[in-house]
Image (cartoon, rainbow, N blue to C red):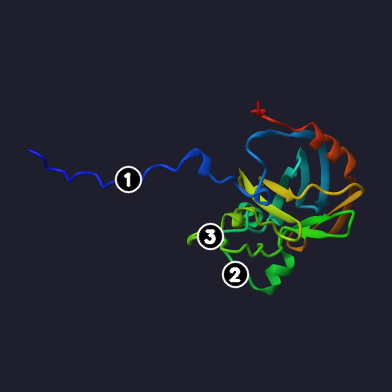
């Protein structure tokens, strides 16, 4: 005797050739071994908080890096994890907080700027929830993107990955940080892109084509 209903029909899985890759501007490629640049750069410091940039992994399409935040004492007034990971917040997001929140970013040698508080690019058919032209997946923003990724931590120590797209041009790469809520005034550090570009040239595919 059958008691349970038959399972619903499932659509055939898509052919491997129809699989869509992540757009290059949204994150590092999963099938490339990056070149590594040993960077230990303090972006901002106060009596309570330090923001640092470490471990840059260079790809032909951009830079993957770690933002490290460390806090101590009563100066760490808010949930550190939420502040670094853009929520969920236990406080309102009024103008005063918008002014004082963690802000950091880059100025490229050609003058373009990108920060962690830039609006998310308005991609055509962004959620791909309706029929779209195949070229939608190849769309790229007309400006650099600094995209936060995964990581973790606790009340006093948080690390978060970031992706900078595209690969910076040769010349000075200026890194800027400000976190007024943690008494970190605007701070600027200058790097040179050449070591990053050299590392990107060492990146290689994990499965070279035959």
Q: Quadrant of residue 119?
A: bottom right
Percent position of residue 44, x then y: 82, 52
Percent position of residue 31, x then y: 64, 34
- The residue labelled by disc 2 is 92
Q: Is residue 57 above or below residue 191?
A: above
Disc 1 or 2, which lies upstream in sequence? 1
Q: Given this view, does label 3 or label 1 mark the residue nearer the observer?
A: 3
Q: Quadrant of residue 29?
A: top right
Q: Is residue 182 left or right of residue 31?
A: right
Q: Residue at x 72, y 58 (%)?
A: 116
User: Secondary structure under badge 3?
Assistant: loop
Q: Quadrant of residue 121?
A: bottom right
Q: Residue furthest left?
A: 1
Q: Residues within 10 Å of mark 1 (few under 14, many from 20)?
A: few
Disc 3 or 1, which lies upstream in sequence? 1
- The residue labelled by disc 3 is 132
Q: CA distance from mark 3 to mark 1?
A: 23 Å
Percent position of residue 1, x then y: 7, 38
Q: Given this view, does label 3 or label 2 mark the residue nearer the observer?
A: 3
- The residue labelled by disc 1 is 10
Q: CA distance from mark 3 to mark 2?
A: 37 Å
User: Secondary structure under badge 2?
Assistant: loop
User: Secondary structure under badge 1?
Assistant: loop
Q: Is residue 89 left or right of residue 175?
A: left
Q: Closer to the camera, 134 or 32?
A: 134
- Find residue 84 and name its label: none
């Amino acid at each position: 005797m059958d008691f349970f209903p038959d399972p619903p029909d499932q659509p055939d899985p898509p052919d491997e050739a129809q699989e869509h890759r992540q757009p290059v501007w949204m994150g590092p490629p999963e099938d490339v071994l990056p070149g590594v640049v040993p960077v230990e750069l303090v972006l901002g410091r106060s009596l309570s908080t330090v923001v640092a940039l470490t471990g840059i992994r260079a790809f032909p399409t951009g830079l993957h890096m770690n933002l490290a935040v460390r806090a101590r004492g009563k100066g760490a007034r808010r949930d550190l994890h939420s502040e670094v990971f853009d929520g969920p917040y236990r406080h309102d997001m009024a103008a005063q907080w918008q002014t004082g929140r963690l802000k950091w970013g880059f100025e490229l040698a050609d003058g373009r700027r990108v920060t962690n508080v830039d609006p998310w690019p308005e991609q055509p058919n962004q959620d791909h929830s309706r029929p779209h032209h195949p070229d939608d997946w190849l769309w790229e923003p007309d400006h650099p993107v600094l995209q936060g990724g995964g990581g973790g931590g606790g009340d006093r120590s948080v690390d978060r990955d970031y992706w900078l797209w595209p690969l910076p041009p040769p010349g000075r790469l200026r890194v800027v940080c400000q976190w007024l809520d943690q008494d970190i005034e605007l701070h600027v550090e200058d790097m040179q892109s050449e070591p990053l570009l050299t590392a990107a040239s060492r990146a290689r595919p994990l499965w070279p084509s035959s």
